[in-house]
Image (tube, rainbow, N blue to C red):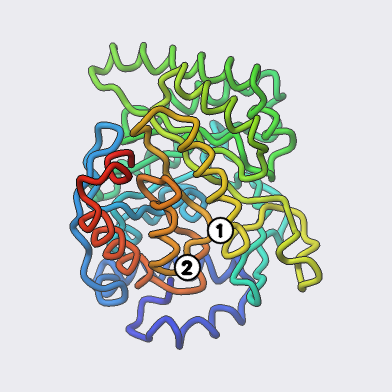
Amino acid sequence: MGPASMIPYAAARPLLFALDAETAHELTLRALDGAARFGGARVLSGCPVDDPVEVMGLRFRNRVGLAAGLDKNAAHVDGLAALGFGFLEVGTVTPRAQSGNPRPRLFRLAQREALINRMGFNNDGVDALVANVARSRFRGVLGINIGKNADTPLERAADDYLAGLGRVYRHASYVAVNVSSPNTAKLRALQSHDALDELLGALCARRDRLARSQGRRVPLALKIAPDLDDAQIEAIAALLARHRIDAVIATNTTVSREAVAGLPNAAQSGGLSGRPLFEASNRVIRALRAALPRGYPIIGVGGILCADDARAKLVAGATLVQLYTGLIYRGPTLVGQCARALRDATRATAGSPARAEA
């Protein structure tokens, strides 16, 4: 995403890349807010794509969404919405504010169009996020991604997820449950069968109570890691179906460095995203599609840097896709390019068995 001026992103990117990655991120979001107020964001990103689709009982404007992590506090919802996304996912948010890991904690690997982050769920807490959502003008599909505080013991993790769910429920179109970030110690242990079974059971029970009291059932989605083997994926798929979780998000960042070994910053700890994640996330999507009931929604994310990449996610079995790192390297026009490609691809295959499955 480029600054608020009408400078093409290709020209602005070298200026942004001359800055520390996190500083450039913060500056760009503030500039995008200004551009949206004066109508400039639409100029930067192009005409929004209308390609309505119903998933999880929600009506999405198009199939391309913003992945969680870019706007952790929902402080830039209106600016980001102006880029033409079909839906936005904000967070990850924790019950209490926390500063995350020490800076620097975000690193570019430009040779491979990748990022490594070890942000550590830095956010202002769930009350601040809810206040920001309430102030925003956006009325499209808004996912809110919830996690646990770093200092909450793993055996009490469910308490944090339940607190987050209760607080965001009224404000979310859907709630995403993040058990797959590599940057909170031991968090990925929640993907093990017994721990995940217990957590999903508690969340669904709480969701059912909230649905009765508020007269509205909010879908739940689970975000999983790309570093799972086939047996783990099959076990998670069985739990998703058993607990009637409404969707799965595949995937979070990877701890693997095989694709970037020897490059500057490759040894930094944290999660790797961007081009090197593309096939790893596709492998998980394909395995999920084979293991899940027909038509079960999969949100594909990881390594989308062009329209062909977005189409490949649908071919692998995704229903919707999300962007993050691709925006850093390709700019805001990526949103419309991917949305148009998915619109054309789904129209071309409308009525086919493969399309009906998605």
Dot 2 or dot 1, earlier in sequence = 1
Q: Secondary structure at mark 2?
A: loop
Q: Is residue 344 above or below residue 61?
A: below
Amino acid at circle 1: Phe
Q: Secondary structure at mark 1?
A: helix
Tell me whether circle 2 and circle 1 mark residues in contact (CB < 8 Å). yes
Residue positioned 69% across, 59% down in the render: 105
Quadrant of the frame with the C terminus? top left
Q: Report x, y in % for residue 297.
A: 37, 36
Q: Which mark is residue 305?
A: 2
Q: Which mark is residue 320?
A: none
Amino acid at circle 2: Leu
Q: Which mark is residue 278?
A: 1
Please indicate whether residue 338 sits to the left or right of residue 147 in the image.
Answer: left
Local packing at callout 1 (Cα closer than 10 Å; few below 14, some 14-19, many 20+) is many
Residue positioned 25% across, 22% down in the render: 216
Residue positioned 67% across, 43% down in the render: 227
Q: Report x, y in % for residue 193.
A: 64, 21
Q: Nearer the viewer, residue 105 or 292?
A: 292
Q: Report x, y in % for residue 74.
A: 41, 48
Q: Report x, y in % for residue 349.
A: 25, 53
Local packing at callout 2 (Cα closer than 10 Å; few below 14, some 14-19, many 20+) is many
